[in-house]
Image (cartoon, grey):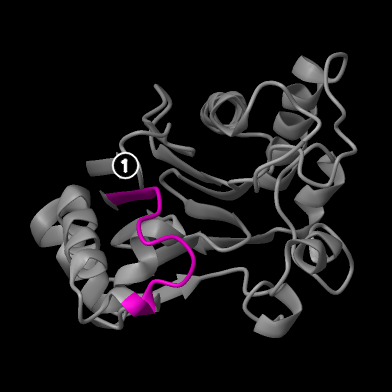
């Protein structure tokens, strides 16, 4: 088994709000966890701790439970992790605030029998079959919302963790039921990768190739190589206008050969 991972802040002057971890439990198999913290606009969020604190707490709990509790489905693990993280600052912060710290989530766990996955919001999981075919597991609810509906912060807030909108891991454990989950026989997966949207820009924003080609870059150049390619594209004057919103975003990628 080979696992390679890398993460980079979008701005070296600001903390990286992503979380990326890998675990190889004593019982065998492995776990990858990737969170992309949602950067709030300037102003009140109801929380004094900040997004990096939140993603570290949530990511740490997800990694520990995913590796140690094989008996727990990933959706239940996400719910328990959200609950534990909320309890850690419930007494000091307003967790009902629409901009309370939150994150996208990808968790993938495998053993000798199966590969389990959970995806919530716009990070992506790639699964490669033995014949080289690559499938992307995505939660596309955010992509289905017309861009005009997200033009202002107020309209985006109204769609956040709401029916007809999109969902992220914040303070409500019930959101775990909204995640995209599944299970694939272990023999049907040769390799896999997780990408936050700062890394998936290589395909989604800049159109440098399809998901199979993206996985080939990860295999040949590693996670840091893919992120380096994204940074070069973001800095290219001829391509820069494609990066809507932030010019550089926090970027995390992990690749595992099973």
Q: Does 234 sit above or below residue 65? A: below
Residue position marked by numbered label 1 in the rendering: 7
Nearer to the camera, 231 or 116: 231
Instruction: Tell me which corner region of the image, top left, top right, bottom left or bottom right, holds residue 100.
Output: top right
From the top left corner, tell me how far across and down residue 73 is, in percent: 69, 43
Q: Quadrant location of the N terminus?
A: top left
The quarter of the picture where residue 88 lies is top right
Residue 181 within the magenta-colored segment of the rendering: no
Q: Residues within 10 Å of mark 1 (few under 14, many from 20)?
A: many
Q: Position of residue 182 (x, y in %)?
A: 61, 62
- Residue 23 versus residue 97 in the image, above or below: above
Q: Residue at x 21, y 65 (%)?
A: 235
Residue 105 visible at all: yes
Residue 13 rendering spot, x and y as whole percentages: 35, 33
- Which span is picked out in magenta? 241-255
* Residue 16 at x, y percent in the picture: 42, 36
Is residue 146 visible from the viewing direction of this image? no
Residue at figure coordinates x 71%, y 21% from the top left: 48
> Residue placed at 65% from the left, 43% from the top?
42
Question: Splitting the image into 4 quarters, where does residue 146 fall?
Answer: bottom right
Along the line of sight, the residue nearer the viewer: 29 or 47: 47
Taking the magenta stretch, the answer to whether it contains residue 242 is yes
Q: Is residue 60 left or right of residue 181?
A: left
């Amino acid at each position: 088994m080979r696992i390679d991972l890398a993460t980079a802040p979008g701005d070296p002057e600001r903390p990286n709000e992503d979380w990326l971890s890998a675990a190889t439990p004593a019982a065998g198999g492995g776990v990858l966890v990737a969170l992309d913290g949602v950067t709030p606009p300037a102003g009140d969020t109801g929380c004094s701790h900040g997004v990096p604190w939140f993603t570290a707490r949530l990511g740490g709990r997800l990694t520990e439970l995913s590796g140690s509790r094989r008996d727990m489905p990933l959706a239940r693990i996400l719910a328990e992790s959200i609950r534990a993280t909320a309890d850690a600052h419930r007494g000091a912060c307003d967790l009902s605030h629409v901009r309370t710290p939150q994150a996208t989530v990808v968790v993938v766990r495998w053993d000798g029998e199966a590969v389990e996955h959970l995806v919530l919001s716009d990070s992506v999981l790639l699964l490669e079959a033995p014949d080289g075919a690559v499938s992307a597991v995505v939660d596309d609810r955010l992509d289905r919302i017309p861009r005009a509906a997200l033009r202002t912060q107020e309209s985006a807030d109204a769609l956040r963790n709401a029916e007809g909108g999109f969902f992220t891991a914040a303070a409500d454990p019930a959101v775990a039921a909204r995640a995209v989950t599944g299970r694939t026989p272990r023999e049907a997966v040769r390799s896999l990768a997780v990408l936050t949207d700062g890394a998936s820009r290589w395909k989604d924003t800049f159109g440098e190739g399809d998901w199979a080609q993206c996985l080939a870059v990860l295999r040949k150049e590693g996670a840091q190589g893919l992120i380096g390619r994204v940074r070069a594209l973001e800095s290219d004057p001829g391509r820069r206008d494609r990066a809507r919103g932030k010019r550089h975003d926090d970027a995390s990628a992990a690749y595992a050969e099973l």
